[in-house]
Image: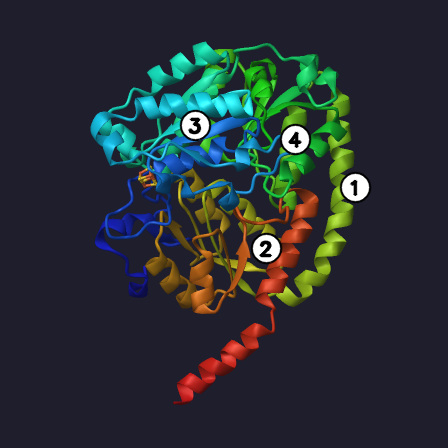
């Protein structure tokens, strides 16, 4: 590898170039001290997965600072209750650290349930709770018995590992909820047929940012599929409790939810498929793979084909105008999961943009191997990166647009590179066929903005000094 790719000694195995050397990237490692990882903590990983459950109380047991990472940072939208948008914290202080926070937790939980009448409550353990040894599970059991709703501890102490361990803690909490009630025909938002549909699926790892889950649900419904639960987007407690009756689990965010899908396969015998809803190839594949799970009803596959043909017929012409301007531009991608990164590489290629840098916070070996085969030779592939590396690689590769999330945005802005938000904060759906058009429009607006001409002029002036 070129010496200009220099990285901290302890991170050498986590950076590679496609087509050069082994495609095996070291991953699933704790972040290296000193590298200021883009990853968030374990608690944040759990919070990201569970917060979209809109009719539950989400109580952060810890100092108020942990609760600063609120719904506003991850805007999963709800078609009904908005309880998930409120941030609750037990606001632990010094005396609680000395004498324990269990009483405070009990009081907070009881008051919140009394006030908001949620269908369930999730209690997130933060670092200090792990250190002082509060028995969070015991308090949850007590309140659950008193109040008659599920109260679930989420063992998400921040020091316990990586963000991925937070995903797992969230999956454990969901697993303890699934199967605790049968599907209730009244729970399915006006469509009681969902409860006993022979073609019912659960969608896992779709967070309903900007209403994306609704787009996906409509596609499946057009095929004759019924969605029993979208656990992590516009989620409802009662739907999750009856999710064990689905015929198939469809996993969109592989990094966060494959663990739960495997557990449900083992416990409830529900098979699962991994899909991505970004880009037209992967979106179409996501529909076909679900249709293939119901071979006894060939009409589902026929409807999927018709849907894909219709949607691609509308999408491709709309992309042409963007492609004309974008041909030859270069993109960098840094996102949470590598499955999404793969879809983005393909989606960008479709609009004439090559990917020169791609990385993720939580990818695994297979993800990176696939990325290595998919990307053009020389593309930098990176696991669990940091601002210093990303900045250097962006400049080295001459990226025109950086696709990432809230923590990548300032890197792009500081370097004077176009930015496309493909993460929690965005308000525009980028999933599905219509999402592909939005994505192309976003990339086009960022990469071709007239502002870059001014910045170039500034650079020339600087150089001339
Ligand atoms: S690392 Fe610990 S203290 Fe910091 S936000 Fe996460 S849980 Fe809270």
Query: Which callout, 3 or 1, points to the residue nearer the camera?
Result: 3
Cα–Cα gap, marks 4 and 2: 38 Å
Residue 4 horizontal/vertical position (percent): 31, 65
Mark toward the start of the polypeptide (3 vs 4): 4
Q: Quadrant of ligand 1?
A: top left
Q: Quadrant of residue 459?
A: bottom left
Residue linked to disc 1: 310
Residue designated by label 3 = 170
Q: Quarter holding the N terminus?
A: bottom left
Q: Specify whether residue 328 is in view.
A: no
In the image, is the residue at mark 2 within 8 Å of ligand 1 by its beta carbon?
Answer: no
Residue 408, visible in the rendered structure: yes
* Residue 414 % position (x, y): 43, 67
Q: Are marks 3 and 2 in contact (CB under 8 Å)?
A: no
Q: Is residue 440 above or below residue 195?
A: below
Residue 256, quarter of picture: top left
Q: Are marks 1 and 4 in contact (CB under 8 Å)?
A: no
């Amino acid at each position: 590898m070129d010496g200009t790719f220099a990285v901290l000694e302890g991170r050498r195995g986590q950076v590679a170039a496609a087509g050069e050397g082994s495609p095996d990237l070291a991953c699933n490692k704790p972040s290296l001290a000193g590298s200021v990882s883009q990853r968030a903590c374990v608690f944040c990983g759990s919070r990201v997965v569970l917060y979209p459950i809109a009719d539950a109380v989400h109580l952060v047991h810890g100092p108020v600072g942990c609760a600063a990472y609120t719904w506003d940072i991850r805007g999963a939208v709800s078609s009904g209750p908005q309880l998930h948008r409120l941030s609750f914290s037990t606001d632990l202080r010094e005396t609680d650290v000395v004498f324990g926070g269990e009483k405070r937790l009990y009081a907070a939980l009881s008051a919140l349930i009394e006030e908001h009448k949620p269908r369930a409550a999730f209690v997130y353990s933060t670092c200090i709770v792990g250190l002082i040894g509060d028995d969070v599970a015991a308090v949850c059991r007590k309140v659950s018995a008193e109040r008659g709703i599920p109260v679930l501890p989420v063992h998400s102490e921040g020091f316990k590992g990586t963000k991925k361990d937070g995903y797992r803690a969230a999956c454990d909490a969901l697993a303890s909820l699934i199967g605790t009630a049968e599907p209730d025909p009244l729970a399915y938002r006006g469509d009681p047929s969902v409860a006993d549909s022979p073609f019912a699926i659960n969608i896992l790892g779709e967070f309903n940012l900007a209403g994306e889950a609704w787009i996906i649900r409509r596609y499946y419904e057009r095929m004759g599929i019924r969605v029993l639960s979208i656990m992590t987007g516009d989620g409802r407690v009662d739907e999750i409790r009856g999710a064990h009756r689905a015929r198939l689990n469809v996993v969109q965010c592989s990094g966060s939810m494959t663990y739960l899908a495997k557990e449900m396969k083992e416990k409830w015998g529900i098979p699962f498929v991994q899909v991505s809803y970004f880009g037209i190839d992967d979106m179409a594949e996501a529909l076909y793979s679900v249709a293939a799970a119901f071979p006894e009803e060939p009409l589902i596959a026929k409807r999927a084909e018709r849907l894909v043909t219709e949607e691609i017929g509308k999408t491709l012409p709309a992309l042409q105008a963007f492609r004309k301007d974008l041909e030859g531009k270069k993109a960098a991608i840094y996102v949470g999961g590598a499955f999404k990164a793969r879809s983005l590489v393909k989606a960008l290629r479709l609009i004439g943009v090559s990917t020169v840098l791609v990385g993720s916070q939580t990818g695994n070996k297979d993800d990176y191997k696939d990325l290595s085969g998919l990307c053009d030779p020389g593309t930098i592939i990176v696991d669990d990166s940091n601002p210093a590396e990303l900045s250097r690689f962006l400049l080295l590769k001459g990226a025109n647009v950086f696709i990432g999330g809230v923590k990548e945005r300032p890197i792009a802005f500081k370097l004077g590179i176009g930015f496309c938000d493909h993460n929690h904060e965005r308000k525009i759906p980028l999933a599905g066929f219509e999402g592909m058009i939005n994505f192309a429009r976003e990339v086009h607006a960022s990469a071709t903005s007239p502002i870059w001409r001014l910045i170039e002029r500034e650079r020339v002036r600087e150089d001339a000094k």
